[in-house]
Amino acid sequence: MSDAKVPDAAVSAPGGGDLVRRHRLSTLLWHWINAFTIFVMLMSGLMIFNAHPRLYWGQYGANSDHAWLLIGSAGERGVLKIGDEIFDTTGVLGVWEDPEGVVKRRAFPWWATIPSNYSLADARLWHFFFAWVLVIAGLAYWLVSAINRHIQRDLIPRRAELSPRHIWRDIADHARLRFPRGAAALRYNILQKLAYLSVIFGLIPLIVLTGLTMSPGVNAAWPWLVDLFGGRQSARSIHFLCAFGFVLFITVHLLMVLLAGPFNEIRSMITGWYRLPRERKP
């Protein structure tokens, strides 16, 4: 889900109002493949979670063990339990109605899962197939980015950008909805750089490795992965948290697209062309 900002070499000193080439083809392809892949994996992952809606730390976890997170029901109520805190989630989580009005007692509702009807086997097929799509697309993106130096040129922060004053100013500008204009809109700001680097080199590798750790076959071949994450149940918990890290990233990403001008932003992610916002008059 990259917003790689690459000035077109053929354009000299672009200014506000100019239509410029913003994204390479590799970025566009990776963005849309990843967008579809992540949504399918999130929804199929929620169906897999429905089979055992509890999370633990350590090597083992069963109904009788202490879970740090639990989604279920208590009588007619849906409940979310995090640590010792219990929240009523009736109608959304734990207890909800399907399209025919039948009350179901599962963690996540039909509209949030793939498939919508309960099927652990089908959910695993969807999840594992698109896990390969995520891995292959990610490796291809890393390779292309190494060749064209996109990461070094566009994503690695400069030392001055990492100063607390610069980061705080960028946070304040976003809070006031003061987005870059003119040629400055072609460059990443420090918050974008940190967010995309965290996803590319943090969330994606971590969610892949924790997913592998939950596989018995991988456990037999690479037992060190289980030790690395402190047990299969710890790996499952980290995998779940990474998934909701993606949800948080996507939510903020879509919010910024809406606030910055959805037509211009979405056009740039489909065609690669972007109209630079006009500079503010003094």
Image (cartoon, grey):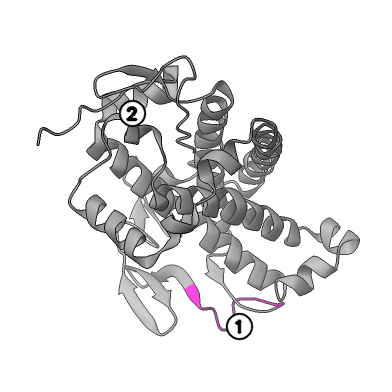
Q: Nearer the viewer, residue 109 or 276?
A: 276
x and y percent of residue 22 in the render? 43, 25
Left or right: residue 175 compared with residue 21: left
3D distance between C-alphas at marks 1 and 2 = 48 Å
* Residues in magenta, as a range: 59-69
Q: Secondary structure at mark 1?
A: loop
Q: Quadrant of residue 125?
A: top right
Which residue: 56% across, 71% down? 55
Q: Quadrant of residue 151?
A: top right
| Position above or below: 229 against 146 | below
Left or right: residue 185 compared with residue 50: left
Mark yes or no: residue 208 visible: yes
Inspect the magenta stretch and tell me whether residue 230 lies in it: no
Q: Nearer the viewer, mark 1 or mark 2?
A: 2
Which residue: 36% across, 81% down? 85
- Secondary structure, magenta segment, majority class: loop
x and y percent of residue 211 in the render? 68, 56
Which residue: 34% across, 41% down? 254
Numbered label tally? 2
- The amino acid type of the residue labelled 2 equals Glu
Q: Which residue is mark 1?
A: 65
Q: Nearer the viewer, residue 29 or 274?
A: 274
Mark yes or no: residue 114 visible: no
Mark 1 or mark 2: name the one nearer the start of the chain: 1
x and y percent of residue 137 in the render? 66, 34
* Quadrant holding the C terminus: top left
x and y percent of residue 227 in the render? 78, 74
- The amino acid type of the residue labelled 1 equals Asp
Q: Secondary structure at mark 2?
A: helix
Q: Which residue is mark 2?
A: 265
